[in-house]
């Protein structure tokens, strides 16, 4: 599996360190610390129910978000916390949602698998594999009709490429020339099963792109600048009306599929190899090599850790939602009545 | 007898049936590594990868190939990880599997089972992983439906389903996988269509299914303290529906409360209530009452899930309303 990480495109070397680099670093750290905090809250019993974290995947959500502007849409899976945060969702509202508290970003109704922040252009996390790919087509269609040059990025896992909805959505996007980037986060596994065990091609998304007349694009998904650069090019095309793309970003989860999964099915050597390639530490090394002083990087880390500790404290102090709220928001009028 | 969890009882049924009949094959996502609910561990080691197929995330392919395999002479047991995902392959279930024997004048035989985890159970799985999909299936003639409530029935009803000549959907309530109970050793098979009366009573009949059977029992315990004697019936299967047992019970108790986890907007309890109101009319001293889930998608937070799901207190309140 070693050469799976070798990208078709490498990140272009940026000019001397600037604020944008530090922002990428800060944003990845925020996702990482939030994942670590969530795992801790789950271990302590505060987070209840399933939870799918993105530690190891941060370079993808952050690299993509760096290419987007207000009016662009993103949409993702149950593994969606990092995607919401990367677009600017409030970390405290996210943690309140995970803890099932008042003020959760989805009013404690969605929970971990449905983190959504429409105000930040993140149209939600969907837990039926493949379902949101056709939905992304609709978001992009609306953008195309509005004609403002906005685009949609749809995130999904390697496993989603084997469900019919993937093929229907990519075909439709290609036929309608939608401003849509399908971004596959290939972490080599579905839940417990390696994607290669159930897929006849090596790159489950990219190798199928040609069937829909699209380019084969594979990128090192643990290299935040490589992701940003590849996505930026695809976003540019989409904004100009040159249609959709598929980008397959190679990555690896640092831990199990979900909080409850010890991930015993992964070979130790593979886990070790990918641990060395994890995106946050790796980007710190890149920035150090660009002569960003260690104190500056430490400062960012401290700031993010403090922020996450503070929001967690406040979220833990928040009350449970009022029971009546279970009966709100089925309908546009705010209620749930279905009969007279 | 052995003390087993629900999940171990499922595994025991699969092992029993695969050992007995080599036409029984399994397929589904992650079934070879043991299944995400740990209902299939070790089966691939005993029976080999030819009979325990790990599939891609392709529910249409899972259910469709189960159908084809049954047509071809096998007795497949497919797994849909969460019953909510039936929505992604409903064509195969509702339009193909349920109808093909009939449409072909009985030429095509479809002895197959699809298992899926069902319901909420306070586990916080949220709106897309907690639905009570048994009532979806009941809308479609041509499907048998089993919903076990005890480890013994997890084994017996699944074995019974595998021995059926018709397609059976088995809904495994995910709140029951970890509960333990006595399970008969050796060949243990429960025929579909026979309800189980857990306790006899004279004042009111409580009917439950899967997870709500425990709710009925808890309510019956508390009602007993108040001097109200409740009979508790576990329906076990929705198709065939053991109407006769419920009517017999109502003939002595004259009151019926049906407890369904799914939303009251529609559901199996409404069908049962309508049948008993019609065929048992002369025996009833009060209208049949239903205690159901609220008509909202299931919320994630524990306090909100409790708010919308049926519980013993709501059953007791319904019983009090009748007397
Ligand atoms: C239609 C459907 N089938 C099965 C599942 C159960 N399930 C949830 S996540 C998952 C694995 C998905 O793998 P992948 O697409 O690679 O995403 P990853 O979790 O690796 O990010 C499965 C099988 C589901 N949620 N929806
Ligand atoms: Mg994956």
Image: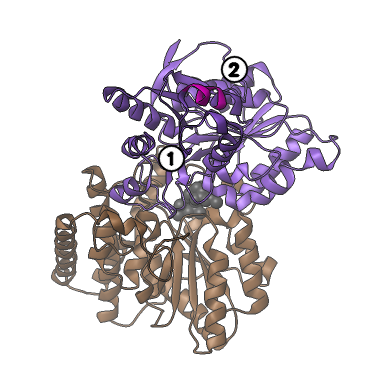
Chain colours: A brown, B purple
Side (left or right) of B281 relative to A42: right
- Quarter of the image that includes the C terminus of chain B: top left
Position of A179 relative to A264 (above/below): below
Nearer-the-camera pick, A244 or B187: B187
From the viewer's perspective, tell me whether residue A294 is left or right of residue A234: left
Residue A86, compared with residue B162, is above or below; it is below
**Secondary structure beneath label 2:** loop
Question: Residue A14 occupies which quadrant of the picture?
Answer: bottom left
- For residue A57, above or below residue A244: above
Q: Nearer the viewer, residue B237 or A51?
A: B237
Q: Residue A155: x and y, percent? A: 47, 65
Q: Nearer the viewer, residue A286 or A36?
A: A36
* Residue A219 in picture, x, y percent from top left: 49, 66
Residue B108 shown in magenta: no
Q: Which dot, 2 or 1, sits closer to the camera?
A: 2
On what subunit does the disc labeled 1 rest? A
Q: Residue A55 in the image: x percent, y percent?
A: 33, 56
Count of numbered marks: 2
Answer yes or no: are tags 2 and 1 on the same subunit: no
Task: From the image, give the main secondary structure of the stretch colored magenta.
Answer: helix
Crowding near the residue tagged with mark 2, few <14, some 14–19, many ≥20 C-alpha atoms within 10 Å: many
Horizontal side of residue B170 vs B310, given as left or right: right
Residue A106 rendering spot, x and y as whole percentages: 33, 63
- Residue of label 1: A267
Q: Residue at x 72, y 39 (%)?
A: B67
Front residue of this view, candidates A1 and B74: B74
Magenta part of the chain: B247-252
In magenta stretch: residue B250: yes
Q: Secondary structure at mark 1?
A: loop
**Subunit of mark 2?**
B
Residue bearing the label numbered 2: B189
């Amino acid at each position: 599996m070693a050469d799976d990480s070798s990208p078709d495109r490498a990140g272009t070397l940026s000019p001397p360190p600037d604020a944008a680099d530090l922002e990428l670093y800060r944003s990845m750290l925020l996702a990482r610390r939030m994942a670590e905090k969530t795992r801790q809250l789950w271990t302590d019993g505060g987070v209840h129910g399933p939870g799918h974290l993105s530690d190891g995947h941060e370079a993808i959500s952050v690299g993509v978000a760096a290419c987007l502007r207000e009016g662009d849409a993103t949409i993702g899976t149950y593994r969606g916390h990092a995607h919401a945060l990367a677009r600017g969702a409030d970390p405290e509202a996210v943690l309140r949602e995970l803890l099932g508290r008042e003020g959760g970003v989805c009013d404690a109704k969605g929970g971990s698998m449905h983190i959504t922040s429409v105000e930040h252009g993140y149209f939600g996390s969907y837990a039926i594999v493949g379902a949101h790919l056709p939905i992304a087509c609709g978001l992009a269609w609306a953008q195309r009709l509005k004609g403002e040059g906005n685009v949609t990025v749809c995130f999904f896992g390697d496993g989603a490429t084997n469900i019919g909805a993937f093929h229907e959505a990519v075909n439709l996007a290609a036929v309608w020339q939608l401003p849509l980037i399908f971004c596959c986060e290939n972490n080599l596994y579905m839940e417990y099963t390696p994607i290669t065990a159930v897929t006849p091609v090596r790159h489950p998304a990219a190798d199928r792109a040609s069937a829909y007349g699209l380019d084969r694009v594979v990128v090192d998904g643990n290299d935040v600048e490589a992701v940003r650069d590849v996505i930026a090019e695809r976003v540019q095309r989409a904004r100009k009306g040159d249609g959709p793309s598929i980008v397959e970003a190679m990555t690896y989860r640092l831990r199990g599929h979900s909080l409850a999964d010890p991930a015993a099915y992964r070979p130790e050597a593979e886990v070790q190899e990918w641990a060395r390639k994890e995106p946050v530490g790796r980007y710190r090394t890149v920035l150090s090599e660009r002569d960003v002083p260690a104190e500056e990087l430490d400062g960012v880390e401290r700031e993010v850790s403090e922020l996450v500790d503070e929001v967690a404290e406040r979220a833990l102090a928040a009350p449970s939602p009022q029971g009546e709220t279970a009966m709100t928001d089925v309908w546009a009028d705010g209620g749930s009545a279905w009969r007279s | 007898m052995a003390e087993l969890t629900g999940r171990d009882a499922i595994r025991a049924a699969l092992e029993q049936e695969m050992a007995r009949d080599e036409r029984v094959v399994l397929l589904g996502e992650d079934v070879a590594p043991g299944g995400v609910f740990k209902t299939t561990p070790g089966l691939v080691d005993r029976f080999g990868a030819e009979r325990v197929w790990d599939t891609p995330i392709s529910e249409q392919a899972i259910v469709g190939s189960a159908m084809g395999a049954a047509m071809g002479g096998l007795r497949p047991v497919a797994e849909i990880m969460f019953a909510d995902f039936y929505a992604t392959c409903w064509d195969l279930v509702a339009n193909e599997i349920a109808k093909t024997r009939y449409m072909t004048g009985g030429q095509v035989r479809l002895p197959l089972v699809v298992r899926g985890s069902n319901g909420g159970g306070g586990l916080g799985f949220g709106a897309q992983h907690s639905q009570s999909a048994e009532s979806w299936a009941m809308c479609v003639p041509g499907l048998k439906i089993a919903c076990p409530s005890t480890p013994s029935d997890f084994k017996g009803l699944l074995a019974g389903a595998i021995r059926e000549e018709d397609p059976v959907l088995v809904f495994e309530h995910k709140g029951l996988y970890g509960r333990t109970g006595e399970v008969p050793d050796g060949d243990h098979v429960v025929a579909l269509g026979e309800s189980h009366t857990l306790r006899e009573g004279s004042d009111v009949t409580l009917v439950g299914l899967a997870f709500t059977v425990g709710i009925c029992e808890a309510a019956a315990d508390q009602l007993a303290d108040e001097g109200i004697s409740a009979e508790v019936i576990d329906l076990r299967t929705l198709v065939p529906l053991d109407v006769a047992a419920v009517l017999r019970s109502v003939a002595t108790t004259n009151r019926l409360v049906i407890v369904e986890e799914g939303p009251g907007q529609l559901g199996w309890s409404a069908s049962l209530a309508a049948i008993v109101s019609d065929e048992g009319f002369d025996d009833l001293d009060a209208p049949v009452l239903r205690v159901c889930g609220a008509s909202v998608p299931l919320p994630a937070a524990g306090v909100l899930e409790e708010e919308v799901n049926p519980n013993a207190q709501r059953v007791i309140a319904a019983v009090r309303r009748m007397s």
